[in-house]
Amino acid sequence: MRNFNEYCKLKKGLAAYPIACAMAGLITMSQVFAGDFPTAAVNTTGLAVTDSTVKVGILHSATGTMAISETGSIQAEKLAIAQINELGGILGRKIEVIQEDGASDWPTFAEKSKKLLENDKVAAVFGCWTSASRKAALPVFEKDNGLLFYPTFYEGLEQSKNVFYTGQEATQQILAGLDWIAKEKKAKTYYLIGSDYIWPRTSMKIARKHIEQHLGGKVVGEEYIALGDTQFGSVINKIKLKKPDVIYAAVVGGSNVAWFKQLNAAGLNAKKQSMLTISVTEDEVLGIGGENLEGFYSAMKYFQSLKNANNDKFVADFKKAYGEASVIGDVTQAAYLGPWLWKAAVERAGSFDVDKAVVALPGYELMTAPEGYVKVDPNHHLLSKLRIGKWLKNGQAEVVYESGLIQPDPFPKGYQ
Amino acid sequence: MFGYTLEEVGNIVVMQGFSGLSLFSVLLLMALGLAIIFGQMGVINMAHGEFMTVGAYTTVFLSKLAVEYDFVKSYFVFAIIAAFIVAFILGYVIEYVMIRHLYKRPLDTLLATWGLSLVMQQIFRSTFGAKEVSAELPEWLLGSFQPTEGIDIPINGVFVMGLALVVTVSVYLFMFRSRGGLRVRATMQNRIMAGAVGINTKQVDRVTFALGCGIAGVAGAAFTTIASTGPTTGSLYIVDSFMVVVFGGAASLMGTIASAFGIAQAQSLLQFFMTSSMGKVATLMTIVIILMMRPEGLFAAKVRK
Amino acid sequence: MNELSEKVLGGKQGALHLAILAVLLLVILPLCLDLFRLGLIGKYVTYAFVAISLVLLWGNGGILSLGQGMFFGLGGYCMAMFLKLEASDPISTKIQTTPGLPDFMDWNQIVELPWFWEPFKSLPLTLLLVLVVPVLLAFIIGMAMFTRRVGGVYFSIITQAIALILSILIVGQQGYTGGVNGITDLKTLSGWDIRTDSAKYCLYFMNAGLLILCIMLSRFILTSKFGMLLLAMRDKEERVRFSGYDVARFKIFIFCVAAMISAIGGAMFTLQIGFMSPSFVGIVPSIEMVIFAAVGGRMSLIGAVYGTLLVNFGKTIFSETYPELWLFLMGGLFIAVVMFFPDGLAGIYEKYAPHCSFSMLRARWLKKVPKVTGERQ
């Protein structure tokens, strides 16, 4: 604001001055006045905060193999930031975005985090998608005391002062879903299958313990597919031999498409086989094709078809911004929460300082989340619900079950 | 037997046999184009996978048209032909612009075509978007065929097998039973002599390369029935394709067929008895070890340079 | 002594080029760039080790290995294993079921340190293994392939397959290797915190110094009789064989040397970046590193270093401003270099430098050079 007034004085146009002042008054009426929060007071650690702007970073892969998945997150984060700016920004300051490309390459994530934090001095970063990229960037955030909002559902086993996890950790996604399918399908035998890396392996470990110790079921097979492998003939035959009541799947990427197509072609469609997957969102359905998924279940916290006022508005806004054909998956929604949570943290703290914002955020309840309601837990994860979606031919899911709020537990006792 | 009835075991053996054959036809389709380009011409085409992706995107594009103009039932046949033509033309152009300058430097074709594959991937990404897409498949390609209760034979697998058979026979007929093939073989065996007897060797090079690319396009079209289509799909196939050709012994069509069969059966069995990813490692490892013992591959008499 | 320096530095011209590179890396860049950018340069320099190894192997030996990433990765992993063990002391890992183990092992229910991790408790042994493990692998591969006269493109394809196997194995055996995330969160080297600014500077200089040393070592190899033989083998392998030389043995040797140089780069990478992941072991990084060498000039050790720096700098700049364009540019660069400038930057320099006025100045300046080389001894 000070800049604006100075600008008016400089012009020294007698006629323009009162009009400009009136305009300035009009704008500030509906807004938080940045002057109420002098920059020196809200930014004691030298972040890129001026009297009228604050810089944040977006760090996802816009190129490379992960671009497929991360594009939705970039869009959602930009949408949220644009909306926050429309409402007057944060502490009267407009958010400026510096977007960096992680290029699906993990050291690049570390490198760009360093650039955002050390060169650009951003107040917060929304980004990372795969666990590997987060693991690579994490030491940088911890060393430079940055603030990261991480959107993806992931394997847990992590909790950092400098990170807020807006997606689900493993137990939030797995336990309630298994409980539901065990009851719904009276399932006794389970076949676990996932891509061969840390998230599916950790998830399957938790799932196995839960099935064996709490559900009284039996795991009849556990299978891991090399990333990018597209041949499932032998795996499907093994499943046919074991005849599990439920297939529990966490296959990702190009393999995921091949898995569903070949499963269907082998006659294991939803009429004959129940499957619960934790790796299919609306984004993946585009590639897999609704006809191959019809009748299978996904366990997520968010589906595009969710019926509530927040979500109706979110879906409408998203489609307005990115086209009618765009779809919104679980992670996209979680990414959308990031900027809003950061806004809340800064406003509750009355400061952009990372140390203050980090302390202020836990306990916050976000009422306007498209998924309905979330609360930030002291362990930096979100309390959220789990939903089971049944896939329809048109690529959307019908929500058939909704759990209560689930407490995040990144280091689950008894599941390790 | 292990708590299963004899019938169950029998069914699995049948289906497992089928999935081995199905993998065999997938590998064969992947490798045939490369066997021509690499085996006959000695060009290492790292963009081979991208030519498959060209075929796949052609199919996806046609399927969109098919949905719009309502010929979903029959479009797949056209799609395969279109995939061949598009990849063929593209291959022809690329041979003319790029490859023909590099015949004397085989290692350099490897690098140049790797660059080409990067460019093609980015073109796919810019044109079709980063997300994976799938072709709308006609009803008759979906689901399975059940000869008896308990045995499911995937129809798309049968389709890919049929296609692999047709393509292999066509390649065989072209290479060994047509004048065109005679020219190709003559040129590859002795370029100067072939030129001396009036064969336009440059034209032959161009057509041969384009032919290999066209076959890759057909493979790509066929793979839309079993796997995904995305900008980087091609890179999933490239190592497998090369392993099949090298293991078979370059310059030998029989070798390629035999090696595709051997690799497919081994991988299929190993993946059945081990976990899938370990099965894959074990297969690759076996191939590499055999190649170290017998560097000329299964079917080649000549010593490599 | 003079002869040795001649060999190591590659004559007046070579000494000058090497001196310029050394000044650039050790003086100019550290003075001009902030620590962040310097860190990037440090990372590129680790890739330059691989580029140098490829100049030896591919440019001079005619052996194109598409698996150099493996050796880079192995060197890096060896270093990372040591650092990880040091970072996982019982106190900082006390929330684990089994304190004192690396965190990813604990998540995978491994309660005892696997045997092959044991040697990495000791620094001297680790430093030795950084060199020995990749060389051993190279020796085995080389033994199997070169004695059976597998060469050319077949060698390339097989090394590529081996790189793929290794990366699937590392990803799949996550309890022992850290899986797809790699070995992360490395903190100290024998108590010395490698994350501090002073350590970063220190490592940068160490890294650049090692690079210069490796260039000199490679020069020595290339200017010796062995280097001549290498060239001869590249161009007319049969003739060398018929002259009574054991071609396979020479090839194995140069392959091992190349593996060792790459491994040093990998170890330095781990130290500077603070983690190692399987994404450096696979096919894509291996081929990218070939292109670094190709852009710089496959015959020129120093050119390869500039090529690496330039391509990576371009990558960073372009992916910051035009991420969409980057792959086009990179791919185009591959094609252009191979088709039009097979000798890369060094080739362009050789071709045009003598005609420009700069070279006249240089020629005048060169007269003073013997003193410089004298000092360097």
Image (cartoon, helix red, strand yellow):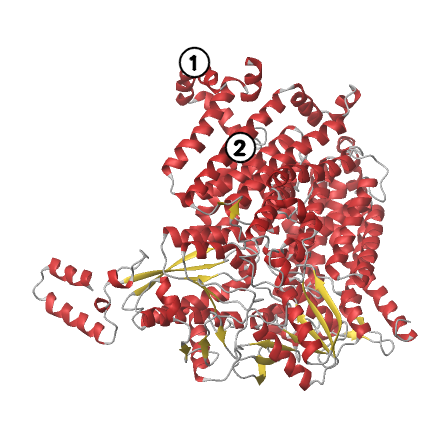
Give the answer, above or below, for where C275 lies relative to A313. Answer: above
Q: Which picture quadrant has residue B136?
A: bottom right
The N terminus of chain A, quarter of image: bottom left
Q: Which one is in front in this view, the residue at disc 2 or the one at disc 1? A: 2
Give the crowd class for mark 2: few <14, some 14-19, many >=20 residues within 10 Å.
Answer: some
Q: Nearer the viewer, residue A194 or B144?
A: A194
Q: Nearer the viewer, residue A294 or C129?
A: C129
- What residue lies at 88% left-to-right and 74% top-to-bottom? B3
Q: Which picture quadrant has residue A188?
A: bottom right
Which residue is under mark 1? C367
The C terminus of chain A, quarter of image: bottom right
Q: Chain of mark 1?
A: C
Q: Callout 1, which amino acid?
A: Lys
Give the answer, above or below, for where C32 lies relative to B77. Answer: above
Q: Callout 2, which amino acid?
A: Leu
Q: Which x, y percent locates residue B48?
A: 67, 50
Instruction: Spot the residue most to the left.
Output: A14
Give the answer, above or below, for where C251 lies relative to B98. Answer: above
Viewer can see residue A90:
yes
Which residue is under mark 2? C210
Viewer can see residue B181:
no
Q: Nearer the viewer, residue C113 or A371?
A: C113
Q: Chain of mark 2?
A: C
Q: Nearer the viewer, residue C41 or A158?
A: A158
- What residue lies at 66% left-to-right and 51% top-to-bottom? C167
Give the crowd class for mark 1: few <14, some 14-19, many >=20 residues within 10 Å.
Answer: few
Direction from residue B142 to residue A51 in the image, left or right:
left
Direction from residue B290 to residue B86 in the image, left or right:
left
Q: Which x, y percent locates residue A413?
A: 60, 72
